[in-house]
Image (spheres, grey):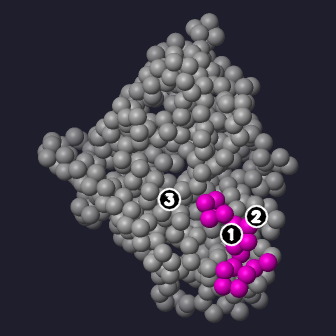
Amino acid sequence: MAHMAQMTGAADGATVPSGFRGAELGWPELHRIPRPPRRLPLLGDVLGANPRTPVQDSMRLARRLGPVFRRKAFGREIVFVWGAEPAADLADESRFAKHVGLGVANLRPVVGDGLFTAYNHEPNWQLAHDILAPGFSRTAMEGYHRAMLDVAARLTDTWDGREKAGVAVDVPGDMTKLTLETIARTGFGHDFGSFERDRPHPFVSAMVGTLSHAQRRNVLPPGAAPLMRRAERRNAADMAYLNRTVDTIVAARRADGALRGHADLLDRMLEVAHPETGERLSAENIRRQVITFLVAGHETTSGALSFALHYLASHPDVLARAQREVDQVWGDTGEPGYEQVAKVRYLRRVLDESLRLWPTAPAFAREALHDTLLCGIHPMRRGAWALVLTAMLHRDPAVWGPDPEAFDPDRFAPKAVRARPAQVFKPFGTGARACIGRQFALHEATLVLGLLVRRYDLHPDPGYRLRVTERLTLLPQGLTLRLSRRSRAARE
């Protein structure tokens, strides 16, 4: 423990500084952590960097620099972690907790202390979590299943028309419509009418604007706000639109006046008090939670579905195996029941393998609860934090083998899963602050994939090469597929 003697962090009970904390404040031996060569004064490690693809830039550096490395740009230095051992260390809830990193903090002007963006010390996180967690119970999930089927039917109606016309489908665009309608219907009893629109709903445009703006702010130098006046005005308009939309949804439910027996998330927000304290969510916090769920509840799932459809289309053997399983397990039933979704286990492996390669929430941050050592090597002061690069954790060859870039759903066969360490697959984050809606997302995505592969053969554009768009979340860029309806004979 010789390193610990060199730590001069905050004493117990002292307040950790708020706002962005550079690595130099929390890592006493930062010089021992590898960084890119050719660091420029003032600018930092910006040579060869693309401000539109910071995650993929970091992935390239990770391959060169190893499982713990650092990057600096415009005075902001961040420690990145992706190796299985240090990532498992950071998952220790007795020593580390969620850190609201720079990109997530940039969303706080619109969602404040919502579940995803709340700081650990803010009481509304625990209050909202305890009130809303039953909304993701097994019983609640069974109640959402009918609405998921209804929205999926709107998607297949649209795709049937495209297939008959011989027109390719816009996969990310249609998955966004599907997942927005699903969370809006199941969570808040609202219909955006996405499938009746030729263009994205204005809510989606405003959401993309706020996410993209938060991403841009990640890579701009401090003090650049005067250069972004137009972008800041656009972002303020986007946030105002999100607020107005949600206020309308909440006002309509309040005007309805009828208790629904906590049938959805909005009912729980409006009607349920904390079971122990009796405290209720404030009107402002309800707005923040609704925006959080509408944005986070559809943006990441649409990306997961889009990547999975890309891999299914580009791996005909995997698609055929998934189709055989769905045909066998679901049979001729028009609409699979809730219990049947969990039984298409190979299809779930396809989804998991897609999330391994491209976790749509590609990183999460963890901060030290007290002075400690990362892997017994790197001293960290209390409040020091690191960014776990999930997309590279999922590619650690020490865990995933010599060809981690290969798409292989059998990595998630039960025997293979049991043979791996517990903390190496983290598409939904980790610990107490992991995604509250992960089972909702997995059920929805597995159901939709099953319905689509049972109905269609998927044909990729021969010239398409996967390109990934970054707007805090990840999405395949420009992905289109051509469809052909499967015959009854093919399903028998």
Task: Give the magenta-colored segment's residue range.
Answer: 38-55
Q: Quadrant of residue 107?
A: bottom left
Regarding mark 2 in the picture, which secondary structure is present there?
Answer: helix
Name the residue: 75% across, 60% down: 60
Q: Which mark is residue 62?
A: 2
Name the residue: 77% across, 73% down: 36
- Badge 3: few (under 14), some or many (20 or more) residues near its Cα, within 10 Å? some
Name the residue: 78% across, 42% down: 406
Q: Quadrant of residue 219?
A: bottom right
Q: Which mark is residue 229?
A: none
Q: Which residue is mark 3?
A: 212
> Where's the C terminus, which quadrant?
top right
- Disc 2 to disc 1: CB gap under 8 Å: yes
Query: Considering only vertical position in the picture, is 348 above or below 188?
Result: above
Front-most of residues 75 and 348: 75
Q: Which residue is mark 1?
A: 80
| Residue kind at label 1, given as amino acid type | Phe
Q: Is residue 52 magenta?
A: yes
Q: How many marks can you see? A: 3
